[in-house]
Image (tube, rainbow, N blue to C red):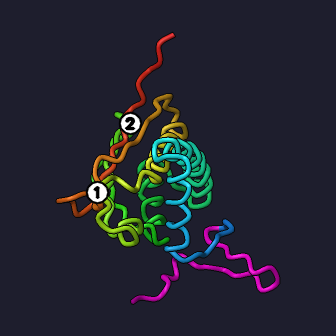
Amino acid sequence: MTKMAPELPIEVDSETGVWTTDALPMLYVPRHFFINNHMAVEEALGAAAYADILYQAGYKSAWHWCAKEAELHGLEGVDVFEHYMKRLSQRGWGRFFTEAIDLDAGTAQVRLEHSAFVYQLGKAGRKIEYMFTGWFAGAMDQILAACGSELRTVAEQTQSAAEPDCDVGRFQVTPRSPTVG
């Protein structure tokens, strides 16, 4: 077990008890608590409906986070995406690796190892990390917008370590199809 890396400090306000990292208030909860709640909502709403809700919320949150972090650290382009993957990896969700990214094409491929969902749920036999898909599209679209591109993307999970014969999760970001009309 390693200690918290100094590049990801957690500050705790002694008066309010609020935890802060990267100038954002954080909640610190056990993994099983979060995932048990996640699964209860999925069961109540259905996986598809819940995945859509999480996609939209995650997209918005990733856009906001990437914009703030890019400004704070003077980052742009692919460096923003890589910084986002690094920070996600430092927060216990799993280890995220950018396998490919092309801003001009609006594409990216992300590999996920050591998924918190797989650690908690095991070989569930299906893709269970759909919560992250909106994060990748939101990050990509914020970066594209900051670069002056009108291209927008969509992300999907293509593989999960929770599926038989898979040992990592994979996500694909591609350009959003233009709408007719």
Q: Residue furthest left?
A: 165
How packed is label 1: few (under 14 Cα within 10 Å), some, or many (20 or more)?
some
Give the label on residue 125, or none: 1
Question: Residue at the location (54% across, 59% down)?
Answer: 40
Residue 47 percent across, percent down from the top left: 46, 47
Residue 125 percent across, percent down from the top left: 28, 57
The residue segment tinted magenta is 1-22
- The three-letter amino acid code for the residue at tag 1 is Gly
Question: Residue at the location (66% across, 80% down)?
Answer: 11
Tell me if residue 176 comes above or below residue 14 in the rendering: above
Query: Disc 2 on helix, strand or loop?
Result: loop
How packed is label 2: few (under 14 Cα within 10 Å), some, or many (20 or more)?
many
Residue 26 lies in quadrant: bottom right
Please state if 168 lies on the left or on the right of 115 as rendered.
left
Sequence-first disc among 2 and 1: 2
Residue at the disc numbered 2: 106
Question: Residue at the location (46% across, 42% down)?
Answer: 48
- The three-letter amino acid code for the residue at tag 2 is Gly
